[in-house]
Image (cartoon, rainbow, N blue to C red):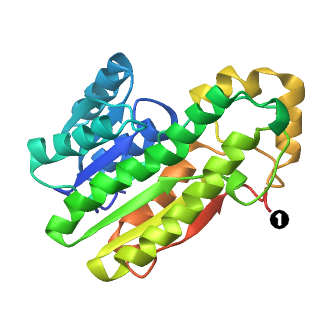
Amino acid sequence: MQMNKRFVDKVVLVTGGTSGLGQDAALAFAREGAKVVIAGRRPEPGANTVALIREQGSEAHFVQADVSQPDSAKAMVQSCLDHWGRLDYAYNNAGIDGVPMVHTADYDPEVWNRVIGTNLTGVFLSMKYELQAMLKTGKGAIVNNSAVAAFKASKAVGSAYIASKHGVNGLTRNAALEYADKGIRINAVCPAMIRTPMSDQGLLKDEALLKRALSLHPIGRIGMPSEVTALVMFLCSDEASFMTGTAIPVDGGFLC
């Protein structure tokens, strides 16, 4: 059965689009007809993702960007406008983990600033310029990648990560309220543990940690990137036209 192409000739920006959740979403948007702008810090995996999209017969280009820096975030969005004259959808996926298992009194301020800078300030700066572009056309949808950590405290992942994801949900809701009457919808997805290259190199290599992670997901397994991507694409699509300001877990029952 051929998939419905919901995003034909639409322009989508995916931050952190060079691997993991971002790459999966970029490829999926392209399969449904979108022109995709992939943003990330690393040119080589960015070029590889562009090549994968072009092999599908779709259009894409890569822009090197550090979303924690205002000039870089602005240039990233301008690249969308320069290439295709518009921006219809954005998936703000770029993020980092920080340092796990370190309590607040011992947390390194430099690491704190780096995590908050990427995970929260990076979402703010991306949205700032994405919204400016979307206001010109009077329509758009933004999805921010948050986490189940936005709903629950955890000693394991560290205070910076927890704070950053709580902040993303608050920022999402407030911006959604601000732009609800401007034709722009803003939502967040909140994954639990998802199988990505980052998790494969970290937690999933440690049998004890993997066992612990599985025990936290009542569904009995780790999530797959496609399961997050499906929700991202739904939230961008016209099928979700009455949804804004939501933060939706994709968590295998983690928050039950």
Residue at image location 46% in from the left, 30% down from the top? 19
Q: Residue furthest top?
A: 44
On screen, residue 162 versus residue 207, left or right, reads: left
Against 183, residue 217 (above or below) is above
Please state the horizontal and vertical placement of residue 127, each as a whole percent of the image: 36, 55
| Image location of residue 230, percent across then percent down | 48, 56
Choose top left, top right, bottom left or bottom right for residue 61.
top left
Q: Is residue 203 above or below residue 22?
A: above
| Spot occupied by residue 60 in the image (x, y as percentages of width and height) | 22, 37
Q: Is residue 33 left or right of residue 147?
A: left
Residue at the (82%, 65%) spot, across then down: 256
Q: Nearer the viewer, residue 75 or 94?
A: 75
Answer yes or no: is residue 234 visible: yes
Decide: few, some or many residues near mark 1? Use Cα within 10 Å; few <14, some 14-19, many ≥20. Answer: few
Viewer-closest of 102 and 48 = 102
The three-letter code of the residue at mark 1 reads: Cys
Q: 184 or 194, which lies in front?
A: 184
Evaluate whether residue 103 shows in this view.
Answer: no
Residue drawn at x 50%, y 64% as measured from the top left: 172
Is disc 1 placed on a helix, strand or loop? Answer: loop
Q: In this view, does 193 lie above or below 205?
A: below
Left or right: 189 as drawn, with respect to 58: right
The residue tagged 1 is 256
Residue 66 sits in quarter: top left
User: What percent of the width, then of the height, locates residue 31?
Assistant: 30, 47
